[in-house]
């Protein structure tokens, strides 16, 4: 099993008048089993650097069915075939639209790597604490 699951997706920027498609990558790593990352390319950022957002895998899964999130990342369905994500930062809000089928496929692969409810088995907290206290 690979250590990370990457899935290229096309997102549609909703904040622009045209709403053009740009590439992005959803990433899930077994070493960080509760989180998902979404990386956007440098050409769409304000400072010319790639933009990486981290959020809960559960947030992404729940957002396929209902509006969720109250912090920096919010997810909601937009009809049967699209999912909208909002990313809130000091500079403003970016809204993107993804194909729900791509999100479902990504989540299915992540649940194959680490089933829901078994994330704690991959956290390695005990080992990290043992290293911290010199017992490892």
Image (cartoon, rainbow, N blue to C red):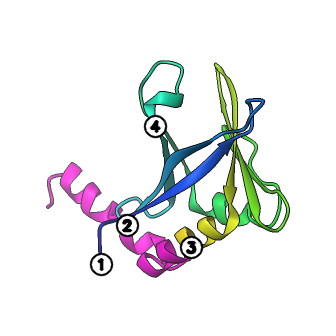
The quarter of the rendered structure image containing the C terminus is: bottom left
Instruction: Say which residue label 2 marks.
Output: 30
Res 16 quadrant in image: top right
78 lies left or right of 87: right
Q: In the image, what residue occupies the spot 50% across and 61% down?
A: 34
Of callouts 3 and 4, the N-terminal one: 4
Span highlighted in magenta in the image: 108-136
Instruction: Say which residue label 4 marks.
Output: 41
Res 17 quadrant in image: top right
Of callouts 1 and 3, the N-terminal one: 1
45 lies left or right of 83: left
Instruction: Give the foreground label among 2 and 1.
Output: 1
Report how far apart the C-alphas of labels 3 and 2 lie in the structure.
17 Å
The quarter of the rendered structure image containing the N terminus is: bottom left
Disc 3 crowd, CA 10 A, few/some/many (<14, 14-19, 20+): few
Label 3 sits on a secondary structure element that is helix
User: Eyeballing the image, is 47 above or below 100?
Assistant: above
Report how far apart the C-alphas of labels 4 and 2 lie in the structure.
23 Å
Instruction: Say which residue label 3 marks.
Output: 105
In this figure, what is the number of numbered marks? Answer: 4
User: Eyeballing the image, is 123 above or below 40?
Assistant: below
Report how far apart the C-alphas of labels 4 and 1 lie in the structure.
27 Å
On the image, the x and y values in percent for residue 92 come to: 69, 23
């Amino acid at each position: 099993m690979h250590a990370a699951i990457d899935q290229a997706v096309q997102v549609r920027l909703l904040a622009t008048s045209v709403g053009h498609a740009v590439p992005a990558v959803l990433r899930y790593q077994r070493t960080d089993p509760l989180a998902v990352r979404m990386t956007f390319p440098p050409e769409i950022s304000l400072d010319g650097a790639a933009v990486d957002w981290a959020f809960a895998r559960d947030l992404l899964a729940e957002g396929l069915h209902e509006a969720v999130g109250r912090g920096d990342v919010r997810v909601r369905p937009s009809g049967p075939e699209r999912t909208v994500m909002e990313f809130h930062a000091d500079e403003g809000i970016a809204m993107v639209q993804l194909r729900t089928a791509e999100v479902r496929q990504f989540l299915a692969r992540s649940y194959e790597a680490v089933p829901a409810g078994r994330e704690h088995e991959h956290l390695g907290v005990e080992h990290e604490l043992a290293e911290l206290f010199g017992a490892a």
